[in-house]
Image (cartoon, rainbow, N blue to C red):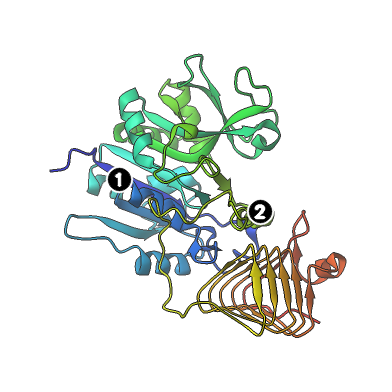
């Protein structure tokens, strides 16, 4: 029998993702395509599976059909040794109500914990882009004897107010306080410009998790959220410690992308994360075969470039045809057509997009099956674009699934 600890992984994938609209108008946030070949949920699942944590429940809720289908069709594990990755929709086991928060999602799904009987429960978010070996965090948790371990990453203070912020004790491990999205976040001792922020990844000793969830469930003042309620509760009890993400060593990682983590919760951060992929020496390297990002790729022919079509500093998916067109610093997914004379720059094109002859697309995100007619322009006149489409604070134009751009 394996000497590895008995661990159950629970992935929180019920998020609505309002700030990613219109990409989340028809799908849950973890199901949003990313990187031309993946969905956001593939990153956390790849990390868990690569690390040997292969009993995984993905808790879903909001518009979950495409997410449930992707998990069911892609993440098939060997049943011979009891491994599984399974989507678990909101079950309303405790009455006719949906999940009211991330802690409530786990509380309503405790039958999964009872059935598996793990010694430790890993609770990870489903919508971040990164590589991590979660088993190293589990081992650090076991060695510490803490009730909960919170993965922390260093971040500039100016950017930290959007996250849970960790204030460490003098020993550099124990969490002295945990503040959810504070206006004036506490900094790391000796570094007035940096904070430790939570990555939304936790390792619990099972008995500690169960006790905390039961206490939270009967607290009328709680919003039943992991970061707002459960982690501060355990911090006050002296049960919480931090795991420094910088200490995590992933096989095949390079200096340039070691420690990379992006919360792609807005259109601008989603676009920026894609731009991180396409430089000659990418900030995040998808080509690490020792720790692959796994997914289910369609059976398509290779990408084709004809009639002088070309792509520079770009990623181009299978089944795509670039015909006499020019593509620069863009991520092009599968089965995209870019016709003669078209120009695409700094953009993210999802599967099935059609770019017409002599069209121009700049700094845009085009969801599945968007059509840009011959001669149309996206991202050229932002004032016009704002009257027709969604335009982010940084000027990224986004067209939702199946939209036909206007001339």
Q: CA distance from mark 2 to mark 1?
A: 33 Å
- Residue under pointer 1: 8
* Outermost residue to the top: 170
- Residue 17 visible, this angle: yes
Q: Secondary structure at mark 1?
A: strand
Residue wearing tag 2: 272
Residue in the image at 62% along x and 34% along y: 155
Q: From the top left corner, tell me how far across and down residue 250 is, in percent.
A: 41, 42
Residue at figure coordinates x 36%, y 28% from the top left: 147
Quick check: 71 above or below 335? above
Q: Quick check: can you spot residue 221?
A: no
Give residue 55's mark.
none
Q: Is residue 131 left or right of residue 367?
A: left
Residue that appears at 42% across and 46% down? 252
Q: Earlier in the sequence, mark 2 or mark 1?
A: 1
Q: Is residue 343 above or below residue 125?
A: below
Q: Decide which of 305, 197 is in the foreground and name it.
A: 305
| Mark 1 surroundings: few (<14), some (14-19) or many (≥20) residues within 10 A | many
Where residue 282 appears, as percent x and y from the top left, is: 58, 52
The quarter in which the C terminus is drawn is bottom right
Which residue occupies 56% across, 74% down? 351
Residue 272 placed where, x, y %?
Answer: 66, 53
Left or right, residue 276 beside residue 176: right
Q: Nearer the viewer, residue 150 or 133?
A: 133
Q: Quadrant of residue 271?
A: bottom right
């Amino acid at each position: 029998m394996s000497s590895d600890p008995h661990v159950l992984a629970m992935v929180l994938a019920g998020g609505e993702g309002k700030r990613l609209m219109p990409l989340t108008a028809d799908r849950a946030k973890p199901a949003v395509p990313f990187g031309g070949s993946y969905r956001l949920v593939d990153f956390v699942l790849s990390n868990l599976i690569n690390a040997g944590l292969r009993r995984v429940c993905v808790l879903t809720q909001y518009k979950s059909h495409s997410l449930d289908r992707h998990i069911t069709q892609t993440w098939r594990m060997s049943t011979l040794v009891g491994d599984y990755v399974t989507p678990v929709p909101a079950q309303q086991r405790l009455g006719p109500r949906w999940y009211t928060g991330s802690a409530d999602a786990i509380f309503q799904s405790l039958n999964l914990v009872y059935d598996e009987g793990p010694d430790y429960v890993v609770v990870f978010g489903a919508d971040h882009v990164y590589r991590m070996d979660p088993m190293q965090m589990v081992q650090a948790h076991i060695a510490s004897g803490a009730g909960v371990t919170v993965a922390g990453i260093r971040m500039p203070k100016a950017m930290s107010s959007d996250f849970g912020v960790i204030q460490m004790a003098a020993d550099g491990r124990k969490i002295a306080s945990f503040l959810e999205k504070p206006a004036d976040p506490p900094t790391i001792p000796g570094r007035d410009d940096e904070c430790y922020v939570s990555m939304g990844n936790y390792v619990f000793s099972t008995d500690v998790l169960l006790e905390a969830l039961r206490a939270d469930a009967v607290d009328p003042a709680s919003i039943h959220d992991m970061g707002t309620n459960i982690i501060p509760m355990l911090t006050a009890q002296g049960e919480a410690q931090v795991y420094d993400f910088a200490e995590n060593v992933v096989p095949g990682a390079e200096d340039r992308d070691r420690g990379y983590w992006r919360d792609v919760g807005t259109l601008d951060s989603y676009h920026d994360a894609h731009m991180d992929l396409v430089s000659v020496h990418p900030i995040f390297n998808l080509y690490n075969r020792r720790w692959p990002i796994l997914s289910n790729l369609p059976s398509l022919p290779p990408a084709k470039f004809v009639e002088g079509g070309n792509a520079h500093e770009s990623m181009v998916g299978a089944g795509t045809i670039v015909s006499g067109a020019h593509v620069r610093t863009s991520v092009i997914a599968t089965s995209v057509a870019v016709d003669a004379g078209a120009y695409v720059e700094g953009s993210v094109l999802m599967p099935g997009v059609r770019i017409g002859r002599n069209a121009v697309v700049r700094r845009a995100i085009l969801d599945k099956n968007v059509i840009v007619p011959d001669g149309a322009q996206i991202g050229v006149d932002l004032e016009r674009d704002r009257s027709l489409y969604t335009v982010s604070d940084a000027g990224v134009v986004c067209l939702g699934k199946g939209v036909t751009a206007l001339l």
